[in-house]
Structure formats: structure tokens, C-alpha cells
Image: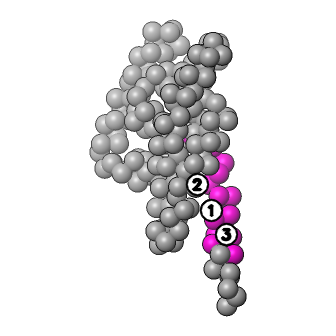
Amino acid sequence: MRKNSHCEYAEKDAEKIITGHEGPLLRYAMRILGDSSLAQNAVESAFIMVLSRRKRQAGLSRDDLTAELYRAVHGAAVALIPLRKRLQEKANVSFPVTADEGERAMEAVHRLNPEEQQMVILKIYERMTNSEISRITQKDEENVATLLYKSVIKVADELKKAGLL
């Protein structure tokens, strides 16, 4: 075995993980933040955090690794929300109000608290099962179902008030 062969293996493994997860994680972060640059920052931070723990990550199943990456992206994205708000205030902009119903629905989702946002985005936009959401959020499936139900009701109420439902 060459002296640095373990490093080469680790790099190839990390590259494979990044390639396999980057697209869905970027989409997820973008839905939380509404800004592609901040979403990229959140995903990069998550990869760095998770992949820097190589020993721990080596024993994870693919599903557990995926769940850990989603948790890390969620944490990084939520931490960037105040920065997004400051940038919007500085530029004197906000989320555009458009006639597009999908964008209006996403605006309603952004007004939920971070935990509720996570549930709605994972279920509706990422089309995950309650079991997958449970693994990512580390909540039992019953709790996921309850939080998801309450969150969707809040979004629906906002959309009804706006005349979209």
C-alpha cells in the first residue's frame, strides 16, 4: 500500500458522496433560503462538516449518511436566514410577489418556523416519506405526521386568505 493511498481512497469516496447528494441538497437549501448563493454556502458547509468526520461517516449506511447530510444542510441553511434577511434589507428587496401560485405557496412556507419549513419542504417539495423525514429530523414518525399536518394547515390557511385556495 502506498503511503498516501488511504488519502486517495478518502478523496474518491468524498467525491462520490458529493456527486451523489449535491443536487438534491442544493434544491433543498434553495427552498429554505430562496437564494442560490446562500444555498451553495449551506451545502458546502454541510459537506465540510460531515465529511470532516471521516471515521464516523465511514460506518454509516447510505440512508444514515443521507439523513446526516440533510440535517447538516438544514442547520447551515437556518443559520444563514438572518444573513439572507440582512442582505434583503440592505438591497431593499423581499421575496417577489407574483401571480405564480407555486411561488406564493413557497412564500407561505417561508413564514413557517424552521422546523415546520423543514417538514413541508421534505414532504411536499422533496417528496420524502414520513419514514425518511423521521430519519433526517430524528423525530418519531407520529411526531413527523403531527408536525407536518399542522404545518400544512398553516400554509393552507394563508393561501385561503390570499384567495389561492
Q: Position of residue 45 (x, y in %)?
A: 57, 48
> Which quarter of the picture shows residue 117?
top left
Tag shown at residue 47:
2
Tag shown at residue 90:
none
Magenta part of the protein: which range?
A: 8-28
Q: Is residue 54 magenta?
A: no
Amino acid residing under circle 3: Glu
Residue 127 makes an appearance in the image: no
Q: Where is residue 11 in the image (x, y as percent from the top left)?
A: 67, 69
Q: Position of residue 42 (x, y in %)?
A: 58, 43
Amino acid residing under circle 1: Ile
| Closer to the eye: label 3 or 1 | 3
Q: Is residue 17 magenta?
A: yes
- Position of 164 with respect to 146 (left or right) is right
- Position of 118 with respect to 2 (left or right) is left
Amino acid residing under circle 2: Phe
